Image (spheres, rainbow, N blue to C red):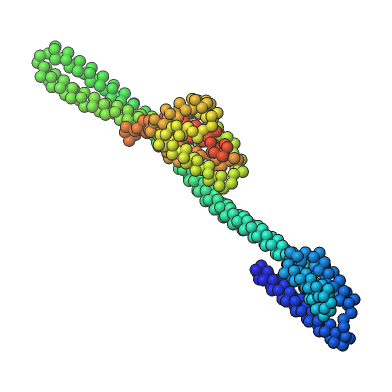
Amino acid sequence: MKQFCVFKEKTFLVKKNQTLNTILMFVLITSTLFVAACAGKFGPIESQDVESHLLEAEREIEFAREANAASLAFEEFEQAETFLEQAQDAYKAKNGIDALKFANRAIAQAKLARRKAAQNTTNAEYNAKILEKDALITELRKDLSSNERKRNDLVTEIQQLRDTEKLMQNNIRTLENQNQELVNDQRELQQKLSEVSESLDSIRARATRYENEVKAYGNQVDELKQKIDVTDTMMKSANKQKRAAIAETESVRKQMREQAKIYTDKLTAANKKNIAADHAEYLRKAAAEARAFEKELHKNEPKRTGRTSLSTQQINAGKAALSQWENSWNSKNLDAHLAYYIPNVTANKIVTIESKENQSNLKRGQMETDLRQMNTQAWEKFDTTLEVEQESVIGTYKYRRLVAAAETEDDTALYDIWFREVWIHQVQGKWKAYREIWQIYKDVPKF
């Protein structure tokens, strides 16, 4: 469109110049014919007529010079000056017709030069305006491109926000489902605890009955021993009753062995029942510790507001930094792992043993020592969660390691559980960890 307008303006100027040239030539020819006609009609030309034409030619040339025709229409201007010189020469030679002819041509060329200079000036102004408009169009196009990029960036960011919203909605639904599962598990656990409690009461009643039976069998064994002693006395005092006494002794001994076996079986059964009762009691205590653990789990965590000032790009960059931090831990590259911490990092360490907490604050030196010692142990990660808070990205990593395996089907394997919660934020354009919370639970069942 811009090129079409420039072409149209240039075409108009060319046509206008052609029209002016045609008019000037017409005036020149008409003046010449008029002079010739006058010469033929009135006789010799008067000198004042020639002089007036020469003065007019000089004026027109001066007007053309003031219009800068000497540079803007130098060919026409030079022709006008040449015609003026020829007219002056003819005047000096007293050739009136040539003097008038050349004077008229000088006038026409001077006017033509002045108009052409004015037209070139106008063209230059038009060209300057056109260039100015071109620059304006270029600037507007740049603004348009910039606005298009901004619009595309906004569309991309809106899409990212929508994706984040969908992800958060999915996380909310997942958490709701997990919460419902926990509620159901809690109900089942309470029901099992109730059943175990009833079974424990029944086992205790049976154990009491077995103990009474064992005591009764013990009394019977004492009575049999007394009978053996009586039989031995009878065997010594009466030889004639020796065989009968021996027979009776053997019978009593057999009965005693049978009663002792029954006593041993009862005692073993009672011990087993007591072991089962102890195991049920241990399960009850473990369940109580688990409930206490669930209650105390988030007690020492910093308060959450659920708000953040980070953009989606910053959140993704923080999560990528946490991923590299975790990879350096898993690959046992402790130097690279510790490089993610600021120099004055602190760690809040809470160790729970049999529901008793031991809390301490670790500075960087002690923290590095503990991390190097912990990295030598065989930790198994079983859960990871990532979240954002204010200007921080938070990663929670859950580990466990076996410390006592179950030797029988009645035993329970024991583990050490370690929760690591690390807070990172941007420090001079880099993501650095500035706070870490450790929750360590010693010798607990797997959960």
Q: Position of residue 178 (x, y in %)?
A: 49, 46
Say whether residue 191 is left or right of residue 143: left
Q: Can you name the residue that lies furthest to the top here?
A: 237
The answer to whether residue 2 of the structure is visible from this angle is yes
> What residue is at 82 percent from the left and 75 percent from the top?
93
Say whether residue 10 is left or right of residue 428: right
Please count the marks in the image: 0
Nearest the eye: 293 or 201: 293
Nearest the eye: 331 or 142: 142
Q: Position of residue 261 (x, y in %)?
A: 23, 27
> What residue is at 84 percent from the left and 77 percent from the top?
94
The answer to whether residue 418 of the structure is visible from this angle is no
Nearest the eye: 97 or 438: 97
Quadrant of the image containing the N terminus? bottom right
Say whether residue 357 is left or right of residue 133: left
Figure quadrant of residue 411: top left
> What residue is at 83 percent from the left and 73 percent from the top?
92
Figure quadrant of residue 430: top right
Q: Position of residue 384 (x, y in %)?
A: 47, 41
Q: Can you name the residue that lies furthest to the front here?
A: 93
Q: Can you name the residue that lies furthest to the bottom here?
A: 41
Quadrant of the image containing the C terminus? top left
> What residue is at 45 percent from the left and 32 percent from the top?
335
Identify whether 51 is placed above or below 229: below
Q: Position of residue 133 (x, y in %)?
A: 70, 62
Figure quadrant of residue 215: top left
